[in-house]
Image: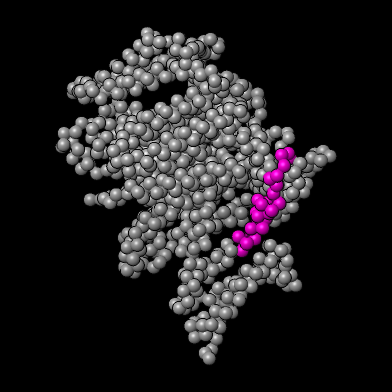
């Protein structure tokens, strides 16, 4: 038997150290456990400060004793390596373990044990825990805002349909894979817009804006047959002519009357709200801000000085101001800039404002990708005789966009997290609805439950998005 | 110079001019119809509204410009508090993320993932409407350390009452100036003779000794004013004396710093990880002590990676502080773009001033950052 030196544990008296250490650590955790779960203080016979610090001292000594290098026990080695490398780490690990044990019972009792979910009025919430009944009763409002209850199937149906249409990419066969970009960039947004406009809002099929869409689609399709030499002039002249023709010559008032879907009740955008509005706003802003940002970033790197400085001005302006002032601008200042008889819906104004705002951030992210590409790529593309657009579409952008997937995903995440700000203009998405519900005299005093509920929802959405973007990043990572 | 180069530029310019012309034409007509004339003269008019919390003397008889200043100062106050705490928390969490202790690492990771995936507005609401509302009323509050009172009506802290404050400030300024000179001197000495001067300990010593001297010989005197509870009515209590930090300020600063700290933590982590292991090994192999390795080799390289994105986060924090309007903390947006706009109806002038304020702030910082980036960039040959 070697001499025991408790200050420097070694392998000679391995099991003595191990057992003493493990017992001490177990004892310290047990004391804290009893204290927190059963409210029993078994060391209360000791004077105050000592009994308070006793678990820490015991655990610390125990961890010190079992800190033996290359003990041969795999479990012990992994503990030593991961949480017990030195005194400081051991102390912090113990502290974290104790804090977790200490905070579990109150959290558990608030969330589950003392909480209420049954019943349908405030009276059932008598316990000290959370009142999930409140969430249950208000659930429809939190999801759909003031959208009339019997019409809510329209939102559900549109979202499910759009989700399915969005998943098309996963099932596409090789033959259709090359059209997927076109589908996601052009076709899908238009379908989504029609769904939301006709179905959720119940608007007329033909209205001012749809002429524009029809004109754009026709001119894009025709554009494939135009020689590339004239393409620029074609795309400047034809869409505008088509729009004017469609609007004023072919059909005007008659079709507006004809196109109304009588079966669906018109629901104005002011009544939209809740989580569905969060989705709608972030979806459209996401669709719009990407192309705008792309063009801004290309403009910023353009050789044409006028285009370059206009792009720089746009980007720096939107990046320099807080979103809340942009929304203020869209709600109080923008109407002053329009002719008196012209009215743009609040939701549309907000979507335009947020899209322009986020587009500036997207532009900066894409610019980073463009700058990261070596000059050789540009030179190689040019030497093959490619023009500006061909070079960018076929060579530069595919590589640059691949590089900036994480950055773009972060911008989109920021966009989703920024949508609650639309409360400034009086649109109530989920956080706004929470604030409204909180001030309802029938349901005072349940602010905490509401915010916890919304936090969990947002956390799930944003965390899933960030994990997905991480996967995308890994998938498209190419060795350079 | 051919047409293909000029035409797109002219077209873009034309579109921009057309849009602006259309907007300003409409704005003129609209303002004419409402009988408003465009101009910034209203800034000198009497504002006749009150602000809850202000750093400078202000009431309804002051001008709109003064109200603007009040809002601006409040914005700066909450931003500075937020930046200080966000930096402290961010650096600690960022280093914890690098720890090889599994528990510390994961705790930091959970903190980062949790706080950055929840909208800032929701966090502000949570602290203001849920967490801080659970605090006790003034009359039931137990003091922390005998002098701090954390109540539902705000955080009451003791205030210093100064005599000859200016002498104290001069002493600090003198200390800072002499530290700068010592630094220059120490650098020169090291470059010429290779001898290191303990700059840090001298600096700390100067910063301590000069203010203490000002207390001893400069006639500087400070006493502490502790907040005292006072009964207003049957059930209304408040504290008198000391400094009152309103709950709006606390919840805003708390949410801003906790939220921004997650981003700063990631910047710190990326920065320290960005210094390659070879650098540390090389530094150690030429005989630098671990402290010198950190100070002379690792930190300068890590800071080069850390500082630009962190400044960006500071800027974001400042812009995000405009969310104060949601909980009625009287910042620039609420006081000026909210109340003042409501009273005067001058949407264009006020929104433009507000935007310009934020814009000039962020553009000046980004110009500074560009300069700084150029200065610290590795000069390759």
- Residue that appears at 33% across and 47% down: A476
Q: Quadrant of residue A436?
A: top right
Q: Is residue B157 above or below residue A165?
A: below
Q: How is the image coloured?
A: one colour
Q: Which quarter of the rendering shows the N terminus of chain B?
A: top left
Is residue B185 in view from this perspective? Answer: no
The answer to whether residue A38 is visible is yes
Is A338 on the left-hand or right-hand side of A425? left
The residue drawn where x is 39% and y is 40% is A408
Residue A309: percent from left, percent from top: 33, 28
Residue A365 or residue B175, whichever sits in front: A365
Is residue B144 within the magenta segment? no
Lateral position of residue A296 relative to residue B95, left or right: left
Residue at the far right: name it: B234
How many numbered discs, if any? 0
Percent position (x, y) of residue A1?
Answer: 53, 91
Could you tell me which residue is drawn at 49 percent across and 64 percent down?
A: B101
**What's drawn in magenta, residue-wise?**
A98-122
The one nearer the camera, B376 or A271, is A271
Give residue A43's quadrant in the image.
bottom right
Between residue B104 and residue A315, name the one nearer to us. B104
Q: Position of residue B48 (x, y in %)?
A: 65, 23
* Residue farthest to the top, as pictured: A249
Q: Position of residue A149 (x, y in %)?
A: 62, 29
Look at the magenta stretch and give its main secondary structure. helix
* In magenta stretch: residue A101: yes
Which residue ends up furthest to the bottom in the rendered image? A1
Q: Is residue A255 above or below residue A351?
A: above
Q: What residue sits 29% from the left and 34% below the top?
A: A301
């Amino acid at each position: 038997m070697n001499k025991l030196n408790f200050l420097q544990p070694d392998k000679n008296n391995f099991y003595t150290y191990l057992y003493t250490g493990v017992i001490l650590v177990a004892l310290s955790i047990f004391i804290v456990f009893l204290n927190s779960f059963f409210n029993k203080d078994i060391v209360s016979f000791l004077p105050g400060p000592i009994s308070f610090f006793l678990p820490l001292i015991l655990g610390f000594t125990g961890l010190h004793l079992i800190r033996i290098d290359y003990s041969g026990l795999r479990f012990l080695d992994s503990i030593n390596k991961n949480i017990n490398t030195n005194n400081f780490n051991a102390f912090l690990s113990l502290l974290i373990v104790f804090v977790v044990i200490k905070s579990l019972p109150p959290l558990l009792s608030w969330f589950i044990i003392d909480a209420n979910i049954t019943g349908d009025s405030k009276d059932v919430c008598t316990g000290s825990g959370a009142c999930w009944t409140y969430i249950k009763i208000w659930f429809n409002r939190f999801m759909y805002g003031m959208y009339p209850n019997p019409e809510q199937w329209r939102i559900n149906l549109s979202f499910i349909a759009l989700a399915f249409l969005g998943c098309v990419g996963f099932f596409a066969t090789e033959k259709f894979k090359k059209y997927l970009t076109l589908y996601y960039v052009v076709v899908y947004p238009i379908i989504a817009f029609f769904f939301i406009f006709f179905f959720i809002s119940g608007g007329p099929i033909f209205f001012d804006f749809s002429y524009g869409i029809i004109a754009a689609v026709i001119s894009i399709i025709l554009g494939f047959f135009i020689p590339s030499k004239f393409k620029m002039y074609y795309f400047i002249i034809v869409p505008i002519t088509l729009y004017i023709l469609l609007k004023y010559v072919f059909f005007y008032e008659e079709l507006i009357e004809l196109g109304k879907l009588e079966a669906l009740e018109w629901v104005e955008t002011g009544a939209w709200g809740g989580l569905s509005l969060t989705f709608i706003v972030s979806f459209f802003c996401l669709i719009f801000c990407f192309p705008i940002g792309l063009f801004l970033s290309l403009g910023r790197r353009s050789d044409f000085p006028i285009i370059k400085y206009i792009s720089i001005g746009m980007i720096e302006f939107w990046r320099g101001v807080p979103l809340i002032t942009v929304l203020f601008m869209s709600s109080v200042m923008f109407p002053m800039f329009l002719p008196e008889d012209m009215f743009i819906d609040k939701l549309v104004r907000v979507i335009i404002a947020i899209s322009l705002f986020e587009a500036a951030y997207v532009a900066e992210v894409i610019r980073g990708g463009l700058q990261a590409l070596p000059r050789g790529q540009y030179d190689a593309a040019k030497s093959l005789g490619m023009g500006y657009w061909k070079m960018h579409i076929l060579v530069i952008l595919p590589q640059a966009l691949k590089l900036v997937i994480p950055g773009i995903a972060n911008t989109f995440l920021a966009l989703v997290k920024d949508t609650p700000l639309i409360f400034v203009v009086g649109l109530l998405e989920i956080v706004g609805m929470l604030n409204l519900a909180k001030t309802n005299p029938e349901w005072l005093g349940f602010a905490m439950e509401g915010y916890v509920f919304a936090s969990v929802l947002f956390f799930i959405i944003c965390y899933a998005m960030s994990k997905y973007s991480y996967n995308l990043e890994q998938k498209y990572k190419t060795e350079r | 110079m051919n047409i293909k180069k000029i035409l797109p530029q002219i077209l873009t310019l034309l579109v921009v001019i057309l849009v602006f012309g259309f907007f300003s034409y409409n704005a003129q007509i609209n303002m004419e119809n409402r009988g408003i004339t465009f101009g910034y003269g209203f800034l000198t008019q009497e504002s006749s509204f009150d602000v809850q919390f202000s750093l400078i003397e202000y009431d309804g008889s002051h001008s709109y410009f003064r109200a603007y200043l009040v809002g601006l100062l409040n914005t700066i106050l909450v931003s500075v508090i937020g930046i200080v705490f966000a930096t402290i928390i961010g650096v600690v969490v960022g280093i914890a993320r690098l720890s090889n202790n599994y528990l510390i690492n994961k705790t930091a990771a959970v903190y980062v993932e949790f706080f950055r995936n929840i909208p800032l507005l929701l966090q502000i609401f949570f602290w203001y409407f849920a967490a801080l509302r659970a605090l006790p009323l003034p009359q039931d509050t137990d003091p922390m350390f005998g002098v701090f009172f954390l109540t539902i009506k705000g955080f009451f802290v003791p205030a210093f009452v100064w005599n000859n404050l200016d002498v104290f400030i001069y002493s600090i300024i003198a200390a800072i100036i002499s530290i700068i000179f010592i630094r220059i001197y120490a650098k020169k000495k090291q470059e010429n003779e290779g001898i290191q001067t303990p700059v840090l300990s001298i600096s700390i010593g100067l910063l301590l000794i000069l203010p203490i001297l000002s207390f001893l010989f400069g006639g500087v005197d400070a006493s502490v004013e502790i907040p005292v509870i006072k009964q207003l009515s049957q059930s209304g209590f408040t504290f008198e004396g000391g400094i009152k930090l309103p709950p709006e300020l606390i919840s805003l600063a708390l949410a801003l710093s906790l939220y921004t700290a997650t981003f700063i933590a990631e910047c710190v982590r990326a920065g320290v990880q960005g210094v390659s292991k070879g650098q540390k090994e090389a530094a150690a192999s030429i005989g630098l002590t671990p402290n010198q390795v950190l100070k002379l080799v690792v930190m300068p390289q890590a800071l080069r990676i850390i500082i630009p994105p962190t400044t960006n986060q500071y800027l974001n924090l400042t812009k995000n502080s405009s969310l104060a309007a949601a909980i009625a903390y009287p910042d620039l947006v609420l006081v000026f773009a909210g109340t003042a706009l409501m009273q005067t109806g001058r949407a264009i002038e006020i929104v433009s001033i507000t935007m310009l304020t934020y814009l000039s702030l962020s553009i000046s910082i980004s110009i500074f950052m560009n300069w700084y980036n150029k200065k610290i960039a590795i000069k390759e040959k």
